[in-house]
Image (cartoon, rainbow, N blue to C red):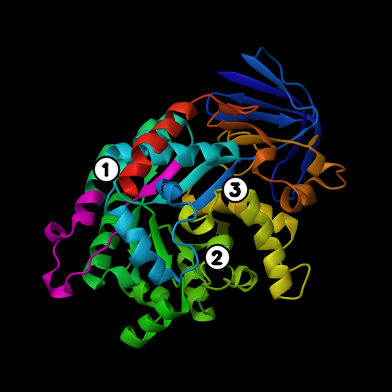
Amino acid sequence: MTTLFTNVTALLMDEAFTTLRYGYVAVDGTNISYVGPNRPQGDFDQTIDCTGKVMMPGFVNCHTHIPMTLMRGYGGGCDLQTWLNDYIFPAEGRWDDRAMAAATGLGLAEMIASGVTCIADMYMRMGVVARQVLDAGISANLCNGAVYFGAPEDFSPDKCGDCENHIRLYEDWHNAGDGQLLVDASIHAEYTSCPPVWEWVAGFAQKHGLGMHVHISETRKEHEACVKKYGLTPIQLLERYGVWDARAIAAHCVHTIPEDWEIMKRKGVSCVHNPYSNLKLGSGVAPIPAMRKAGVNAALGTDGVSSHNSTDLFADMKLAAVLHNGVNQDPMAMTARQALEMATVNGAKALGRNTGRIQAGRVADLILVDFDAPNLIPCHDEAENLVFSAHGSNVCMNMARGRVIYQNGDFLTLDLEKIKAEVRQYALPLIFK
């Protein structure tokens, strides 16, 4: 399939932060084949006129728990541990595959409609999630977050179900869809497991060349308890066990310290900033500008809808910018360009994906934003409008891996009415009896 976009205004997200105007973007198969001011030669299977719209790379949402869409607004007003133990964990104990598929479909629809083309998802029953993501058309790094509450001396891979889950997910889904799906290794968090688990998961990642996905220093209580128990921060502790010897993403990093950032820079560990979730749960504000200055790659995530209430990455991009400017009392602490980088090219780097920029040879993950919408008029600067004025409902086209999967309100890979019926008639009654 070949596609030609004409009359293109596009933020290329290259090093020079170029804005292409009155240009052309061509797509051949899954990749971008041309970007420039002149119409490329040849015929195309479809042509899309971009007049009145702005093109940008699709969003890379680097930390999600898609099925938790069903828990939108559930158990609000609690601290993290109360919320998890009294609301989330009991609800999660009632999942089955059918409910998981419906919840995943609903979450994917919300993401696709708001411009997401690639995600990193950590949850359970990930084979069900993988099937839904593959059919929907976006790219995903998927993982089972390893949890083990047994005594460390009793640990063996045979006694930890999440070790088997790692093996099964890798064997069944890694590189599915010609690389559309990648499997990462994962430790849920330092406080939900122990050293033998960390060693096993780190070894599994190294053996198979996988990335790593871990919750890190989300709350002050969690961070300080780790220091009290081990004499090391979670970042420092997991380094001792080889967890950061692979491409890795550390979600949250709210209470990390400069010594952690040195490790992250040295090991190439990316921070995934989840500003909405961290603020809603009262966890704090990750020191992103300081981390960036220390050389840490910073990306963006929405976390689960259970603690965010939406998957609109436009909201997190705007919040990240205004939050850090306010906290640092510096209007340049987080610029529009930097916020856009976190949502696109930085996320691609964090996940090891050849996307995040509009450039020949990159994967054709592209979205169009309707700049005729009232909230985007006038436009003095496209980047300023995208970061500070736009929201997910302004997305009018989503192309993932060279395939248009959403256009003008229509889902082309999902049956939204069927998904909503499954959610209302089966999944919700099952989970919230």
Question: Mark 1 or mark 3: which comes first in sequence?
Answer: 1
Q: According to the image, label 2 marks what residue? A: 280
Q: Any magenta on residue 142?
A: yes
Q: CA distance from mark 2 to mark 3?
A: 15 Å
Q: Callout 1, which amino acid?
A: Asp
Q: Nearer the viewer, residue 430 or 335?
A: 430
Q: CA distance from mark 1 to mark 3?
A: 27 Å
Q: Residues within 10 Å of mark 3 (few under 14, many from 20)?
A: many
Q: Callout 3, which amino acid?
A: Asp
Rendering coords of residue 136 (x, y %):
46, 31
Q: Secondary structure at mark 3?
A: loop
Q: Callout 2, which amino acid?
A: Lys
Q: Residues within 10 Å of mark 2 (few under 14, many from 20)?
A: some
Rendering coords of residue 130 (x, y %):
36, 39
**Residue at position x 25%, y 72% from top?**
195
Q: Which residues are magenta?
A: 140-165
- Residue 312's tag is 3
Question: Mark 2 or mark 3: which comes first in sequence?
Answer: 2
Dividing the image into 4 quarters, which one contains the N terminus? top right
153 lies left or right of 318 = left
- Residue 32's tag is none
Rendering coords of residue 63 (x, y %):
48, 54
Q: According to the image, label 1 marks what residue? A: 96
Where residue 151 sits, quadrant-wise, is: bottom left
**Residue at position x 47%, y 79% from top?**
220
**Residue at position x 75%, y 53% from top?**
388
The answer to whether any part of residue 111 appears in the image is yes
Against 261, residue 50 (above or below) is above
